[in-house]
Structure formats: C-alpha cells, structure tokens
Amino acid sequence: MKLNMLLFFTFFIIIYGFSNYYIALRGWQALYSVSRTGALLWVAGVVFLALLFIIGRFVDGKLPYSGTRAIMLSGSYWMAAWFYLLLLFAASDLLRLLSRLPFIPAMVWSDWSYRFFLASVGLVLIILILGSWNAWHPVVRRYDLVLPRKASTLNELHVVAVSDIHLGWVVDSQRLNQLVVKIRDLNPDAVFLVGDIVDEGIDPAAEYLIPQALIKIQPPLGAFAVLGNHEYISQQADRLKPYFQEGGVSLLRDESVKVADSFYLVGRDDRSSTTFNGGPRRELPALLAGIDRESLPVILLDHQPFNLQEAQAQGVDLQISGHTHLGQIFPNQFITGAIYECDWGYLRKENLQVLVSCGFGTWGPPIRVGNRPEILDIHITFAP
C-alpha cells in the first residue's frame, strides 16, 4: 500500500508541477509585453499558491490554528483556479493549432492573448465566487419511495440521509452546525450518514464539536453511519468510533441491525478499507446471511455505488450511497457519469432502488459548479 501511495503522489506531483508551469508560462507570455512587473508578479503568485496546496498537506497541527486554516483555504481555492485556468489556456492553444488549418480563419496569439488572459482570470474569479456561494447553500431533495414488503410495525418511514460532509479544515464546524439545524428542522424518524464524514485532516475545533453536534440530532429510531474512503485515507476510521458513540450515532462496519422490528439496516465497510490497512470488508452474501429478506425490507448503506448488480442479486430493497459528488465542479460530471452506473439521483434495477447523493460538503476546492450540495429527505411507504 505504501508503495502504491508513493507512486500515486509522485505521479500527481509531476503532473501538478508541469501544469502549474504551463499556467505560469502562458500568463508570462500574455503580460510580458504589457508589463514586466505584472508578468513577474503572475509567475510568483502561481508558484506561491501552487506550493500552498502542497504545504497544506504537511502543516496540519504544526502551525497556529489561524495560519493553518489560511494555508488550507488558499491552497484549496487555488486548486479550483488551477483547474479552470488549465482548461481555458489549453482551449486557447487548441484554437491556435486549429487556426493553422487552411479552412479556418487565422488567429494570432500575440494579437489577443493579453485580452484572453484577462478575460480568463476574470471568469475564474467569478466562478470561484459563485461556486463558493453555491457550496454554502445546500438544498433538501425529497424522494418518495415504496418498498414492496410489509414492515412489522411501520407503515411509513421518514429518513434523512447525508453523505460526504468532509468535515475538516475547509468544511468547518460552522457547516456541521448548519447541517444539524437542517436535519432537526426536517424531524426525521432516522438519520443515515453515508460515509466521508471527515476529510484527510480534521480541524481541531471541528473535531471537538463532532459529538456535541451529533447528540443534538437524536431521531426516534436512531442515527446510523458508515465509513467512506476518506476516513481510511486519513487513518481516522478507528479514531472516529468514540465520537460517534458519544454523539449517539451507531457506526455500522460490515454490520446489520433490525430497526423497530420493521426493517433491516445493513452498513458496509468502504471498499477502500483493504487498500488503506482497514482489512478486507465482508462479502455482501455473508453480510446478509441470517437476515429474513422475505418478510422485512433491507436497506443497505454503502458509501461507493459500485457493483449495484450485487445488491440487486442479493435481494436488497434500497441502497443509499454517495462518494461521487457528481464531479463537484463542471465538467467533471461527465467523468463520474462514465464511471458509475448511477452517479447521482435515483435508479431502479428490478426490485432494487438506488439513491446516490452528490454530498453535503466539498473535497479540495470549497466550491461547487454545476450541482448543488444536498440533504436527502426520503419518505418511504411499506407496501405488501
């Protein structure tokens, strides 16, 4: 695992370094003829901000709180700016190449690069501002479902499900409190936290408030959680358990529980647990062994929506997942759409119904473009 991680981060640093060099170079070329000072400041700014993202991975807890948070936020915002500047500058170079074709009107870089550069930087700033506002304003998305099995004592069930909070240095305790207030306003019977509750590094203030925030939820039928890949990447999987216990949340790690004698709730450990020293997760047939799938509904919480046909084959009635963020920033949803059978929303596969949330928080850049952070408000009717 350590070798794989080392290779991954080495590859990332190389790509990240060359792409930042490309952004700095294009800005230098656009500004140099107009202002040498401006060109130098641009290059220095790109180098500084690019390094902040790397430095932020190593200063967690080693600097005063305000300094660490400033580095984390600045580096995270640069990741979004880097992404869009790279797309825009690459598009401009593609146009230059196309302009050399005989049937396309000629375009000369030196004639319009300065204006294009300023327009690109301005557009990226607008995206950062609007994307930040969007990330701070989640929506409550309602789903009305019918599960085709009669529950023993319940005719209806009201569930609130939240995935991908990514509580850390960027998504802080203020966002966690915002989430708790919205959940309480919905007044659900049960709450499901579907993985990636924390990020790679936890803000000490946010970490301290996890139990205090969760204890305020306390729905009648209980609050339940499963882990996601980021709990394992950050090595927080075992450390989080007492926080959940203190906050009144039942953590399901390849476990099942019968709730109110009316349905089975099955929580799978994340598929990344093996990669990041969490141990292999149990196979779904073994996890469902001994569960009366004929008389009571089965609801499965699995952070990553892979292998949906497995849950379908095993007679699961409803699977709730997250993880995808729906790409988080445009146009990444085209990538998640190619990877996952269902990367967001509702899918029905014969008797299996699937809900995939795009998540409440953010990872990396604290912005969302092309989607809204969400809380799932699920109203279930149990029918014969």
Image (cartoon, rainbow, N blue to C red):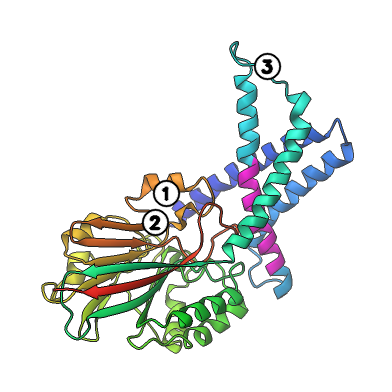
Determine the CA span between mark 1 and mark 3.
36 Å
Determine the CA span between mark 3 and mark 2.
42 Å
Span colored in magenta: 69-85
- On the image, numbered disc 3 is attached to which residue? 106
Q: Which label number is shown at residue 259?
A: none
Coordinates of residue 72 in the picture (x, y in percent): 66, 63
Which secondary structure lies at badge 1? helix
Amino acid type of the residue tagged 1 in the rendering: Thr
Determine if the magenta segment contains residue 71: yes
Pick the residue in front: 57 or 46: 46
User: Would you say residue 128 is visible in this rendering?
Assistant: yes
Quarter of the rendering occupied by the C terminus: bottom left
Determine if the magenta segment contains residue 319: no
Lower sequence index among marks 3 and 2: 3
| CB under 8 Å between discs 1 and 2 | yes
| CB under 8 Å between discs 3 and 2 | no
Pick the residue in front: 68 or 315: 315
Lower sequence index among marks 1 and 2: 1
Q: Which label number is shown at residue 344?
A: 2
Q: How many marks?
A: 3
Query: Which residue is found at the position 62% from the left and 33% from the top?
Result: 90
User: Would you say residue 53 is visible in this rendering?
Assistant: no
